[in-house]
Structures are given as structure tokens and as C-alpha cells.
Image (cartoon, grey):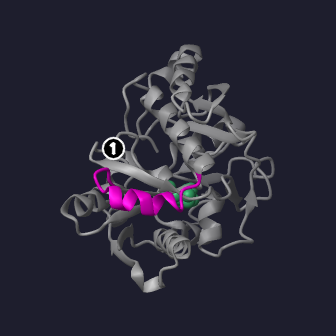
């Protein structure tokens, strides 16, 4: 089996984890699965914000082409980076158990401890808006690049603090860095911490193999969070935060917040619904938009699915 992946260290670690789980589930030797790396456009173009250069498609388009051509059997993705609208020929065959969903603050012990007027390095509209909401005195500076690049920029003083996903740091073996922020007060990005495996929907042979490594509660949460995005119709500029947790064995509790990009405005809503009905999150999206002030609503198409960072 050939598994396509981006070549960044984090993407490779995620592909390795997928291979290990797949081989363990089926009793295969490790060399039964080959990792096939690609340099994605999103990795090649580092000097401009993702939202300006084409959005999340820049993480997936090369792997999508390889799937269509049969160069690879499946692609491993950070679900956070996968566009809301995907080609109908593709399906998410499995989602691995969710890792730590929290953001980690690097450079200060807490949000309150960041010195007045300090610079926050981030290119994520959600992180920028959340930070400016909590700390309007701070300045946001653009901070693209993979995890190591961003930590390097912080070390060289290009910003005073930055925010990274705990899941990424753990997968890279970079524990001990920064302070995890409480997920209830600092809601993560949609699908943060979840690894997904995508393949052609027509490959029934693969779907049954991947079912063995699917984590049903995580998959249900990711479906719900993506349904929320579909309902919101955001773009790469739309700051969206969400936390989903299983309630008992059959239900999900989902809490979502929208911000204006400058952090001045915030709306929040939550709902509990059956895991089997993730579409409820789409209705929650419409409620959020109905409650949102104009300064937030202008950043959403309200029901037309888009491309969300
Ligand atoms: N936007 C890049 C990205 N995509 C997924 C992760 C982390 C891993 C994950 O959330 O599963 C990261 C790095 C980060 O946000 O710090």
C-alpha cells in the first residue's frame, strides 16, 4: 500500500503513526506500507499568508492528483488543513484517535503574563482574533512556516510569543515547550489534533482496511466540526473556534465561537446531538450567524461551504 503525505516533519510523523496503526491492526510487516512524500504548494510558498495564495487547497492538491492517478492508494492529512468541500470522488476512510486538541502558548507562562504591547507571531486568523479579543493591547505579526520554522522565528525575536497546536508538538517529540491553554476558555481550531486518511470513494477494498483503524467518536466529532464549517461558509480569513467532546457513548457536545478578525467581537453557541447526526452542527452554524454582529457576519457566506483555516 502506498500512503501519500506532505514531506514536512509533522506530516511525516503523522504518516508514520498511520502506517504503524495500519500494520498493527492487520498484522502486516512495516514494509507492507510505503510512505510517499510530496512537497505541497503550501510548503513551497512560505512568504505569504495561506489565505492570500489559495487557501487550504494548497495542502491537498498534489495529493488529490496522485489519488486520482493511482500513484498513491490513500493520503494522510491533518484534518485541520483539509478544505471543507472535497471532490466527490474522495472519502475520508478513517480518522485516528484525536490527540491533545489544545493550543500551546510559547514565550509566556499565560495569556495574562504576556507583556503589554508584545508581538504575537501567528498567521492563523482564529489565533490572532482570540488573542486580540483577550489582549487588545497586543500586535499580531505574520508567522508562516512549519513548527520548527516558527519556533526559529520566535528564537530570533521576530515575535515575543507564538501559538502552536499541542498535537503537533507531541508528534514531533517537542514536549516541554510552552504552556497548553485550557481548551474550554481557548477553543481550538476545527479538527485540530485529528489525522484523517483519504482515498477514492470507489476503493471498497481500502475502505474495509482503513475501517480497522478508524476511531468512531473522533470521526463523528470531525464530521460535526466540518458540518459546522459547511454551515458557516467561512474562508481562510474567518476566525472559527470549536470544541467537541463525547457525552456518554452516543452523543456529542459541541461549542463554537466566531470572532471578528480584530478580536473586538465574539459570539458563541453550543449544542448536544447524537454522534450519528453530525449535521446538527450545520444548524448551530446558522444560529451563530443569526446572533453575530455585522462585523463578524461579513466574513462568512452563511451556508455556502468555503475554505477555512
Ligand atoms: N496549521 C498547520 C497545522 N496543521 C495541523 C497542525 C498540528 C496538528 C494537528 O492539529 O493535528 C498544525 C500546526 C499548528 O497549528 O501548530
* Left or right of 173 on screen, residue 295: left
**Position of residue 298 measured from the top left corner of the image (x, y, whole percent):** 44, 22
Residue at 75% across, 39% down: 248
Magenta stretch, residue numbers:
200-215
Q: Is residue 144 visible?
A: no
The residue labelled by disc 1 is 86
Residue at 71% across, 41% down: 249
Q: Residues within 10 Å of mark 1 (few under 14, many from 20)?
A: few
Instruction: Tell whether position 207 is magenta.
Output: yes
Residue at 29% across, 68% down: 72
* Left or right of 262 on screen, residue 246: right
* Left or right of 94 on screen, residue 110: right
Compared with 62, 201 (above or below) is above
**Position of residue 39 measured from the top left corner of the image (x, y, whole percent):** 32, 70
Nearest the viewer among 84 and 102 is 84
Nearest the viewer among 119 and 56 is 56
Instruction: Tell whether position 150 is magenta.
Output: no
Ligand 1 shown in quarter: bottom right
| Label 1 element class | loop
Compared with 64, 137 (above or below) is above
Nearest the viewer among 126 and 34 is 34
Q: Is residue 237 visible?
A: yes
Q: Quadrant of residue 161?
A: bottom right
Q: Quadrant of residue 17?
A: bottom right
Residue at 54% across, 56% down: 214
**Position of residue 160 measured from the top left corner of the image (x, y, whole percent):** 65, 59
Amino acid at each position: 500500500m502506498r500512503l501519500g503525505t506532505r514531506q514536512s516533519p509533522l506530516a511525516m510523523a503523522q504518516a508514520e503513526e498511520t502506517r504503524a496503526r495500519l500494520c498493527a491492526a492487520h498484522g502486516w510487516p512495516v514494509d507492507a506500507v510505503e510512505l510517499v512524500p510530496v512537497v505541497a504548494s503550501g510548503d513551497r510558498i512560505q512568504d505569504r499568508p495561506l489565505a492570500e495564495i489559495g487557501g487550504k487547497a494548497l495542502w491537498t492538491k498534489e495529493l488529490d492528483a496522485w489519488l486520482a492517478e493511482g500513484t498513491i492508494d490513500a493520503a494522510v492529512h491533518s484534518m485541520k488543513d483539509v478544505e471543507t468541500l472535497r471532490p466527490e470522488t474522495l472519502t475520508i476512510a478513517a480518522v485516528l484517535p484525536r490527540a491533545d486538541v489544545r493550543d500551546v502558548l510559547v514565550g509566556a507562562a499565560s495569556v495574562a503574563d504576556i507583556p503589554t504591547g508584545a508581538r504575537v507571531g501567528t498567521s492563523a486568523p482564529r489565533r490572532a482574533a482570540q488573542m486580540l479579543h483577550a489582549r487588545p493591547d497586543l500586535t499580531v505579526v505574520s508567522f508562516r512556516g512549519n513548527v520548527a520554522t516558527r519556533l526559529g522565528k520566535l528564537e530570533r525575536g521576530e515575535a515575543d510569543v507564538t501559538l502552536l497546536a499541542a498535537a503537533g508538538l507531541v508528534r514531533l517529540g517537542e514536549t516541554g515547550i510552552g504552556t497548553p491553554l485550557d481548551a474550554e476558555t481557548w477553543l481550538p481550531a476545527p479538527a485540530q489534533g485529528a489525522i484523517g486518511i483519504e482515498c477514492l470513494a470507489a476503493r471498497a477494498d481500502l475502505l474495509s482496511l482503513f475501517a480497522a483503524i478508524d476511531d468512531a467518536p473522533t470521526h463523528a466529532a470531525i464530521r460535526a466540526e466540518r458540518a459546522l464549517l459547511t454551515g458557516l461558509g467561512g474562508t481562510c480569513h474567518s476566525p472559527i473556534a470549536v470544541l467537541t467532546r463525547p457525552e456518554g457513548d452516543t452523543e456529542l457536545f459541541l461549542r463554537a465561537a466566531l470572532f471578528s478578525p480584530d478580536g473586538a467581537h465574539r459570539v458563541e453557541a453550543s449544542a448536544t446531538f447524537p454522534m450519528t447526526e453530525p449535521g446538527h452542527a450545520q444548524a448551530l452554524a446558522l444560529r451563530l450567524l443569526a446572533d453575530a454582529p455585522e462585523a463578524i457576519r461579513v466574513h462568512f457566506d452563511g451556508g455556502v461551504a468555503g475554505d477555512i483555516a
